[in-house]
Image: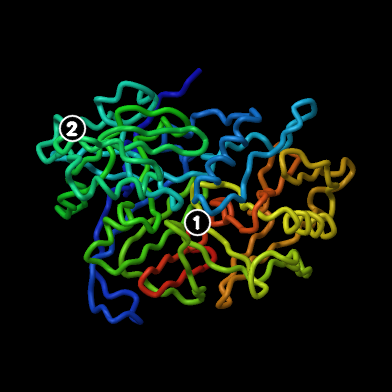
């Protein structure tokens, strides 16, 4: 029996945008600024209707997930779909790409209406499903956005200069031809998910009367693919049209976030931030619309994983940040080295044959679970920033005796840090300083 869908607001969590007026980031030359603060929830949080959605156990779930990773940028081709052996058992195949996705709320229009949207650092163009949608918008829990009910809604015309730069965010050609025609967009992902509609402006509401008068977004009139249970997506990439860039106008250009455990709450903040005790910073770079830093070392227990020859530069590897990806993707040889190191250090489990580019371990029948020894993994970045992954962070648990690493094999030469391994880590993306800050256990 299906459970009743529950809207996010019914849980009375502080998920709306609030403004903190404090002196933060004392190392900057800014004396005071607003900090936009949103609460974020895991998609399995009990306050979200998506928590009732069954996990897709089919091989196509992994194919869709890998296609999502491929769309990070045309220059990153590190994650082709795995070759799944359909004649044998499918191991660790039950986690679709959006299982470790995260949701927040925005208020759009006048009067403001609340919408639950995915956050994604690998996406650029924000869009919301609209009431005029003719296809694929019937699965979400929140009411569709009704442009006719908003007194501040405006469509963008083809003759607008903004219409000419939208393809930089959607990565598709503009279909406008006539000056006074509505500016259309076509946001197509490599998993064949599509969001089509009309580029629009409307008021983005903040708590306590604060707002953005002209928020640019896509009013979706046709949708197909994964994620239809959400109202839309707010991209957090470096593109000038992303939600991050628009909210950052007039503020210190930085965002900080912490992805929580499924039953907890996290946060997403824009503007000045507090440099917490113990936070370490790593130089940050951009490749197209996407953020990356450099990994200098990975350790499994006391074993150092040496990077394969020919990968990276100056004994480092590029690491892209993608909250829309659950797994951490590693180049083939580095993935094999990590799997071997875990096998050499784990006690109480034996390694299974890998399917779908993933390594799994089965608990030994006569082994006492209390005696199980699972090594920690340290991911080290330039500037001494680190992420420490303890036993509970390393796995997707398939059943009581089967553990599968939350790392997967990719075909390219870059690392993609997935949301599973960002969970509970306080992360700062500081565009002003071109730096990325990391602090373990920033949230529950």
Instruction: Give residue 193's position: percent from left, percent from top.
Output: 46, 33
Label located before the other in sequence (1 or 2): 2
Viewer-side label of 1, 2? 2
Q: Residues within 10 Å of mark 1 (few under 14, many from 20)?
A: some
- Identify the residue at image location x=32%, y=49%: 14
- Identify the residue at image location x=29%, y=50%: 165
Q: Please tell me which residue lies in front, 95 or 128.
A: 128
Instruction: Give residue 253's position: percent from left, percent from top.
Output: 32, 67
Q: Seen in the image, is 313 located left or right of residue 210?
A: right
The Cα–Cα distance between marks 1 and 2, rounded to whole angstroms, is 38 Å
Residue 180 sits above or below residue 436 on the image: above
Residue 70 sits above or below residue 342 on the image: above
Q: Please tell me which residue lies in front, 439 or 164.
A: 164
Q: Secondary structure at mark 2?
A: helix
**Res 147 quadrant in image:** top left
Q: Which mark is residue 341?
A: none
Q: Secondary structure at mark 1?
A: loop
Instruction: Give residue 124's position: percent from left, percent from top.
Output: 38, 49
- Identify the residue at image location x=45%, y=45%: 102
Q: Residues within 10 Å of mark 2 (few under 14, many from 20)?
A: many
Instruction: Give residue 442's position: percent from left, percent from top.
Output: 48, 63
Mark 2 = which residue? 147
Furthest residue in direction left, as rendered: 151
Furthest residue in direction front, as rendered: 177
Q: Which mark is residue 444?
A: 1
Q: Seen in the image, is 314 located left or right of residue 284?
A: right
């Amino acid at each position: 029996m299906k459970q009743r869908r529950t809207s996010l607001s019914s849980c009375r969590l502080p998920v709306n945008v609030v403004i903190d007026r404090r002196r933060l980031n004392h190392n900057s030359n800014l004396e005071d600024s607003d900090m936009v603060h949103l609460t974020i929830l895991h998609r399995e949080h009990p306050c979200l209707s998506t928590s009732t959605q069954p996990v897709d156990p089919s091989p196509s779930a992994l194919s869709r997930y890998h296609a999502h990773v491929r769309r990070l940028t045309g220059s990153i081709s590190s994650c082709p779909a795995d070759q799944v052996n359909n004649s044998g058992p499918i191991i660790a195949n039950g986690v679709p790409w959006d299982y470790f996705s995260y949701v927040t709320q925005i208020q759009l229009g006048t009067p403001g209406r609340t919408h639950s949207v995915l956050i994604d650092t690998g996406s650029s163009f924000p869009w919301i499903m609209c009431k005029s949608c003719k296809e694929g918008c019937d699965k979400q829990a929140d009411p569709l956005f009704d442009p006719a009910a908003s007194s501040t809604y405006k469509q963008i015309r083809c003759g607008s200069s903004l219409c000419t730069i939208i393809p930089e965010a959607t990565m598709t050609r503009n279909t406008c031809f006539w000056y006074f025609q509505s500016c259309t967009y076509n946001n197509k992902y490599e998993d064949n998910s599509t969001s089509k509609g009309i580029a629009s402006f409307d008021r983005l509401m903040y708590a306590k009367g604060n707002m953005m008068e002209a928020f640019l977004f896509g009013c979706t009139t046709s949708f197909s693919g994964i994620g239809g249970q959400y109202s839309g997506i707010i991209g957090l990439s470096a593109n000038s049209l992303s939600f991050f860039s628009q909210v950052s106008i007039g503020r210190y250009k930085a965002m900080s976030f912490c992805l929580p455990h499924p039953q907890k709450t996290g946060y997403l903040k824009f503007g000045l931030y507090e440099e917490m005790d113990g936070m370490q910073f790593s130089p940050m770079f951009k490749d197209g619309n996407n953020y990356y830093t450099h990994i200098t070392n990975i350790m499994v227990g006391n074993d150092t994983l040496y990077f394969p020859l020919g990968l990276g530069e100056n004994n480092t590897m590029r690491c892209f940040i993608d909250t829309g990806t659950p797994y951490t993707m590693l180049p083939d040889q580095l993935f094999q080295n990590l799997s071997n190191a875990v096998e050499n250090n784990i006690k109480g489990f034996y390694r299974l044959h890998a399917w779908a580019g993933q390594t799994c371990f089965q608990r030994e029948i006569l082994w006492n679970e209390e005696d199980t020894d699972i090594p920690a993994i340290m991911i080290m970045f330039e500037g001494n920033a680190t992420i420490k992954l303890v036993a509970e962070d390393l796995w997707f648990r398939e059943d009581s005796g089967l553990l599968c690493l939350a790392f997967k094999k990719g075909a390219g030469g870059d690392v993609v840090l997935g949301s599973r391994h960002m969970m509970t880590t306080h992360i700062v993306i500081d565009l002003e300083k071109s730096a990325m800050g990391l602090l373990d256990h920033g949230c529950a």
